[in-house]
Amino acid sequence: MTKAKIIPPKPKRTRKRTPNNRITTGFKIADELWKVLQPLLPKHVNNHRFGGGRPRVPDRHCADAIFYVLRTGCQWEALNQTELCAKSTAHDRFQEWVEAGVFLRLWQAGVEQFDELQGIDWAWLSMDGAMTKAPLGGEKNRAQSD
C-alpha cells in the first residue's frame, strides 16, 4: 500500500502586491464602436436545462476585454489581472463571435462607413498573394502534396 504524498502549504507572500495600472486595466471601447458592434452580436439563448445558471457577463464587458487583448497583444491569461472580465469568459465569447462572423461583419460595416465618409475608388484595388512550399518542409509524418 502506498502512502499519500503530503504537499506542504505555500509560503506567505512577504512583498506587497504591485497595484494594477488603472489606465490599462480599465480599458473600454468607444461608445461609437459599441453602437456598431452591438447589433452584429448573436442573440444569447439560455441552454441551461433548468433555465437558470450563472448570470451571463454582459457583452459590453466581454467586448472591452476582447479588444484589450487584440489591441495590446497580451495573452488571454493577462485578463485575470484586469478588471474587465475573466480570460475564459472573454475567450469563449471571442470564439463564439468569430464562429458567428461578427468580426467579418464589423470589418464590412467599417469599410462601408469609410466609403460613405471618404469614398473608396474601387478601380484602384488589387490583391496579391503567393503560394509556396515551406522552406523546411513542415511536419515529417504527413502526406506530401504534389
Image (cartoon, helix red, strand yellow):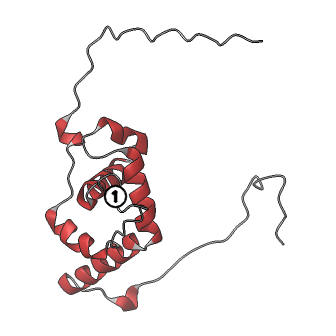
Question: Left or right of 115: which side holds 104?
Answer: right
Which quadrant, please, contains the N terminus? top right
Q: Residue at x 35, y 63 (%)?
A: 51
Residue furthest to the left in view is: 31
Question: Image quarter for residue 137?
Answer: bottom right
Q: Is residue 43 above or below residue 84?
A: below
Residue at the extreme bottom: 123
User: Which image quadrant is residue 44 in?
Assistant: bottom left
Q: Is residue 135 above or below residue 34?
A: above
Q: Position of residue 28 (x, y in %)?
A: 20, 53
Give whichever of 1, 61 is nearer the camera: 1
Of residue 79 and residue 86, the one placed in the foreground of this image is 86
Residue flagged by tag 1: what amino acid is it?
Gly
Q: Residue at x 39, y 59 (%)?
A: 93
Residue that label 1 marks: 52
Residue 136 placement (x, y as % from top left): 76, 52
Q: Mark 1 packing: few (<14 Cα in 10 Å), some, or many (20+)?
A: few
Quadrant containing the C terminus in the rendered view: bottom right
